Image (cartoon, coloured by chain):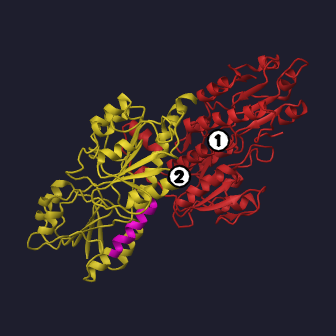
Chain colours: A red, B yellow
Amino acid sequence: MRIAVTDGIDKNAKLDLEEMGHQVEERHYSKEELLGGCISDFDIIIIRSATKITSDIIKANRGEDSSLSMIIRAGVGIDNIDLTGATENSVLVCNTPGSSTNAVVEMTIGHLISSNRLLIKSDRMMREGLWAKKELRGSELRGKNLGLLGYGRIARGVAEIAKCMGMNIHVFDPYLSDYDDGCVYHDKVEDLFSSCTHISLHCYLSEETHHLVNSELIKLMPKVGVDGIHCGNHIINCARGGIIDEADLHECLVSGHLSTASLDVFEVEPAIGNELLTLENFQATPHIGASTYEAQSRIGKEIVSIVTEFSNGDSPKTRLN
Amino acid sequence: MRIAVTDGIDKNAKLDLEEMGHQVEERHYSKEELLGGCISDFDIIIIRSATKITSDIIKANRGEDSSLSMIIRAGVGIDNIDLTGATENSVLVCNTPGSSTNAVVEMTIGHLISSNRLLIKSDRMMREGLWAKKELRGSELRGKNLGLLGYGRIARGVAEIAKCMGMNIHVFDPYLSDYDDGCVYHDKVEDLFSSCTHISLHCYLSEETHHLVNSELIKLMPKVGVDGIHCGNHIINCARGGIIDEADLHECLVSGHLSTASLDVFEVEPAIGNELLTLENFQATPHIGASTYEAQSRIGKEIVSIVTEFSNGDSPKTRLN
């Protein structure tokens, strides 16, 4: 099969596909090129998050002679693919849902500890020649309530480690019933926020979740841990930009309703010149939650298996339409 | 009793001691003042790490009219107290060994994740206006070997969380026999280093451990994880400065034998102007491993209990001589 790879692929996966006789072409296309039908000759297009596949792009590449019949999203989130448009044009969409889980889980725990213990601010101050121990006193996670907004694969991985660290796990996920796993389940998102000094986001971006986290919700957070320690409020987002209203986040970081905020994802990416980056109590990573050598290797293996299933005429296990 | 507090104390602990009828005086003394006998009128001196109590200082405060009979170290490490000198002059020394454990455990895990996922470098680059996703690909901890040099309270806490994160725990501690806890125990420190891509230090500073970690040991580290991923080598020290030879550390960070190093402690503190701080793959915190609101509260409670035992004529449980 002819495969277009627009946002990169693990080297070993490319080699494996080529050894299996597939023709793999790695190249990034502009929106204009895609709208011009540049991928209609390929059977499969493999994208990450940088390529947006709109309904118009799908139509433009599904003419009479077109062979395009599958889009593979190397990763999880498919908000950059018009799934309805793909279905209407008989293009199959698959993703690699399990491959990035552990990478994002570890990233979330990393942001959680480093924000609460001021690791990034510490390093910054030391590089500026300051040894400011008193200013850098932090708070521990053990004994605190961690609220998870959304309780899919990643959130459950975070919960497992956080429990092991002695945190109490609270959950809000309207699409799930209660599990019997020792977490506290809330029916209202307001109850999650008023119960937790620490909140981590793990939901999809949708109309329902767009700007769901605003200053009204943040101001419900208790600032004082259930252990009686005044630890302040902390928010982590390693899910999708746009779930948090960034103007509200800025306001709450300045007013002190939030002690820290940690974002791996932003409403507008690349997030260069974002005003949050001027704040001392804010910390950022450039959407690298899934960006590990291990995840790339797992994603590569999963892509090879999807292409194999598809070229054998089977229905890939991770198909979304 | 008259109590001198030289490096600060938790507010509630001070109030509790005063309510019990003790006289608490908070003030930092210079070395000269201490050598001049300025604390001979106190029954108890409470210090953290900033006050050094040498044998000469103890002698200078143990004249005929002296009442000084106990030194309490608010924290764990007693390398700033001459224990032999204290014993020879009949001064009791106590510390608060359990109070800081969890704070340092969480700090260690925080350094471990943030170095492997380049959190600090990411934030620094973003503040400089760079969105460098490719340069910031990191590696996961799951499936990697974590070597613990020293296996006391803190190391065991780190092991518990790291195991939960899917790491394999290796241990070198010549003062302990093997436990049956799923760790791999090594008889030689060289074997620990040659087995592990990730090393965290949890031993005391002594003649035996001074500059124990040098380039010879670091160069034994395998760079490739047992999962086959080329993750590089990573070292964390939240124990005591001086265990690592910092010149060797610098050399290994530049040569690539180490991918990252994370220090909370330094041979010379405050570590201002330390050359390591100019390196991109180095990260630092200013000896704040135990510096949490929770630990300060626990240390305060332990101090109140030591003073109570002592003033009742009982032998404090955490006495060291």
Residue at 36% x, 71% y is B302
Give the quarter of the image for residue A284: top right
Q: Tag 1, which secondary structure?
A: loop
Chain bearing mark 2: B
Q: Which residues are magenta?
A: B291-305
| Badge number at residue A99 | 1
Q: Please indicate whether residue B32 sits to the left or right of residue B180 in the image.
A: left
In front here: B194 or A281? B194
Residue A289 in view (yes/no) = yes
Residue at mark 1 to residue at mark 2: CA–CA distance:
16 Å
In front here: B109 or A97? A97
User: Does residue A217 lie above or below A26 as drawn?
Assistant: below
Confirm or deny contact between disc 1 and disc 2 (CB under 8 A). no
Give the quarter of the image for residue A151: bottom right
Disc 1 marks a residue whose amino acid type is: Ser
Looking at the rendered image, the quarter that the N terminus of chain B falls into is bottom left
Q: Residue tagged by mark 2?
A: B165
Chain bearing mark 1: A
Q: Please indicate whether residue B229 sits to the left or right of residue A29 in the image.
A: left
In front here: B103 or A288? A288
